[in-house]
């Protein structure tokens, strides 16, 4: 089966033939929900109740349930799919693990989901606990699970689901560099997605399945490559890069984006949109028509009362912590991934400054924060502990260590290793006590220049031979996001205070906090 998206110019005779046995199905899809069970603000952090009452908020599980139920009522034949990263983002995950995700996804009635990198945040055991609770298949084709037999017994590479008398093949993939992005442990070997996908396509076709959908937690740019490198997919539903497709402002491309004849869709993140796509197949399993757009889950979507009541019950143990006001901000603090993974950003400066401030009396000169660890912005006005935890949800601890200037330069080169790929730039380095210049057009290994370190009251050039004290987080210090050069650092201590606590206390000491940029990262085009 080779998917062919027929254009309107096709002959009347051919269209009539296809219509004689056409099969229609509506695909509803989500991705990168990241624990946003309650409504979010325009900054993708938890929305204040008064703002929600005024209609200023988006998403939330109570609205998502309504949107899915309404979409199912509009169509006769519906499949609900998720492209991964339900886990991690707010206190719900820190308190309940994946239990609330499992409960709410069962309420929504998902048909299948892919494993995202954050599904491994509590290790293989956390994923196993989640899979044991859900009522639908969880898919990951590009991993050797021989060393994790319990997961091997419950995860599937692909699945065949019957809908309205037709068999639909669903395949799942997860990021190849999962070991850098999360905590899958040493026993899982992740493999090339395109090869794994093609193997599943071939097996499904051999079983007589001629309608095949990929749930790809790989990022939009990788999905474009998968569409070229594989043969037989009818649809790719993407995640991981938080990409918005559609005809709205800020979209990265059309919904769907057609590459090599394969439609690709994705629906941003955080439950702000519900993807809705209608496919029409001919009797040979070829897509003949395709239409749809992501649905914005705004205040026009009613909140399901039953879900609201359940979430309020689940939130009771969390409220004392997250509602504590820790500081004020004189203006919004920008923490969007489009900035913090590509250039100096206000949230990066805040977090790096807070880290360095906490340990500067220990002889530490430099702070490094990975852009992928910054998960939201904060709006102006009162700042709650819950908002800080939404920005820094990973429970990372401060790590201090010593490395030479040459190793630090290697680390900065790693930070821009994938600078040209917006889906893979979580390693980007936000810094304090340091300045550096990026030339993205240079070859890898020579993109970083003019590295300057604060000595006393002025910046001086980085000395390759000198040993510097550095503060980062335990994820980075132990090799996360490709920072393998820190694994063998000297005098490493990974058990400092929680990064969110450090940031909240720094904000309190500097309240009202005024966000700023000061040119510590320069980009030369």
Image (cartoon, rainbow, N blue to C red):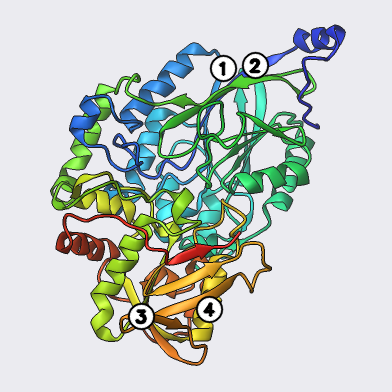
For residue 346, above or below residue 408: above
Instruction: From the image, state whether disc 2 or disc 4 is nearer to you.
Output: 4
Q: Which residue is drawn at 81% across and 32% down?
A: 2
Which residue is the extreme one toward the bottom? 465
Q: Quadrant of residue 449?
A: bottom right
Label 1 to label 4: alpha-carbon separation: 55 Å
Label 3 to label 1: alpha-carbon separation: 66 Å
The reply to whether residue 121 is in sight is: no
Q: Nearer the viewer, residue 129 or 464?
A: 464
Earlier along the polypeptide chain: callout 3 or callout 1?
1
At label 2, counting other C-alpha atoms closer than 10 Å, the crowd grade (few under 14, some 14-19, many 20 or more) is many
Q: Which mark is residue 77?
A: 1
> Are circles 1 and 2 on residues that touch, CB within 8 Å?
yes
Q: What element carries label 2?
A: strand
Label 3, on which residue? 458
Instruction: From the image, state whether disc 3 or disc 4 is nearer to you.
Output: 3
């Amino acid at each position: 089966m080779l998917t062919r998206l027929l254009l309107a110019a096709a002959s009347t005779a051919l269209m009539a033939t296809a219509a004689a046995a056409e099969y229609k199905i509506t695909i509803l899809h989500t991705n990168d929900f990241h624990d946003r069970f309650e409504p979010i603000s325009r900054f993708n952090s938890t929305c204040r109740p008064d703002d929600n009452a005024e209609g200023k908020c988006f998403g939330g599980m109570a609205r998502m349930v309504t949107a899915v139920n309404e979409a199912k009522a509009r169509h006769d034949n519906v499949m609900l799919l998720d492209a991964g990263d339900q886990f991690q983002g707010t206190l719900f995950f820190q308190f309940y693990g994946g239990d609330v995700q499992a409960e709410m996804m069962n309420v929504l009635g998902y048909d299948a989901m892919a494993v995202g990198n954050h599904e491994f945040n509590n290790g293989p055991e956390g994923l196993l606990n989640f899979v044991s609770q859900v009522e639908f298949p969880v898919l990951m084709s590009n991993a050797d699970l021989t060393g994790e037999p319990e997961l091997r017994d419950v995860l599937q590479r692909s699945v065949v689901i019957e809908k309205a008398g037709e068999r639909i093949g669903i395949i799942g993939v997860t990021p190849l560099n999962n070991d850098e992005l999360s905590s899958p442990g040493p026993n899982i070997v992740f493999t090339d997605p395109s090869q794994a996908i093609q193997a599943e396509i071939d097996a499904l076709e051999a079983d007589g399945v001629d309608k095949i959908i990929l749930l790809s937690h790989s990022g939009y740019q990788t999905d474009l490559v998968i569409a070229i490198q594989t043969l037989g997919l009818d649809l790719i539903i993407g995640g991981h890069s938080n990409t918005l497709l559609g005809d709205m402002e800020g979209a990265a491309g059309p919904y769907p984006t057609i590459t090599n004849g394969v439609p690709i869709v994705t629906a941003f993140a955080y439950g702000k949109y519900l993807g809705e796509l209608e496919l029409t197949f001919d009797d040979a399993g070829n897509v003949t028509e395709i239409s749809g757009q992501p649905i914005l889950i705004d205040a026009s979507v009613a909140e399901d009362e039953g879900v609201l009541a359940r979430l309020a019950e689940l939130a009771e143990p969390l409220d004392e912590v997250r509602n504590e006001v820790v500081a004020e901000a004189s203006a919004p603090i920008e923490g969007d991934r489009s900035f913090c993974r590509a250039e100096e950003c206000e949230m990066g400066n805040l977090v790096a400054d807070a880290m360095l401030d906490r340990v500067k009396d220990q002889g530490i000169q430099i702070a490094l924060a990975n852009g992928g660890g910054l998960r939201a912005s904060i709006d102006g006005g009162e700042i709650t502990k819950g908002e800080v935890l939404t920005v820094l949800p990973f429970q990372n601890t401060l790590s201090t260590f010593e490395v030479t200037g040459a190793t630090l330069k290697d680390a900065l080169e790693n930070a821009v290793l994938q600078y040209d790929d917006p889906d893979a730039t979580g390693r980007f380095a936000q810094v304090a006590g340091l300045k550096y210049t990026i030339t993205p057009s240079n070859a890898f290994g020579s993109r970083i220049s003019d590295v300057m370190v604060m000595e006393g009251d002025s910046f001086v050039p980085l000395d390759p031979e000198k040993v510097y004290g550095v503060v980062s987080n335990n994820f980075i210090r132990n090799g996360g996001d490709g920072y393998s050069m820190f694994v063998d650092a000297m005098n490493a201590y990974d058990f400092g205070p929680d990064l969110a606590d450090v940031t909240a206390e720094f904000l309190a000491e500097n309240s009202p906090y005024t966000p700023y940029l000061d040119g510590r990262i320069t980009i030369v085009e």
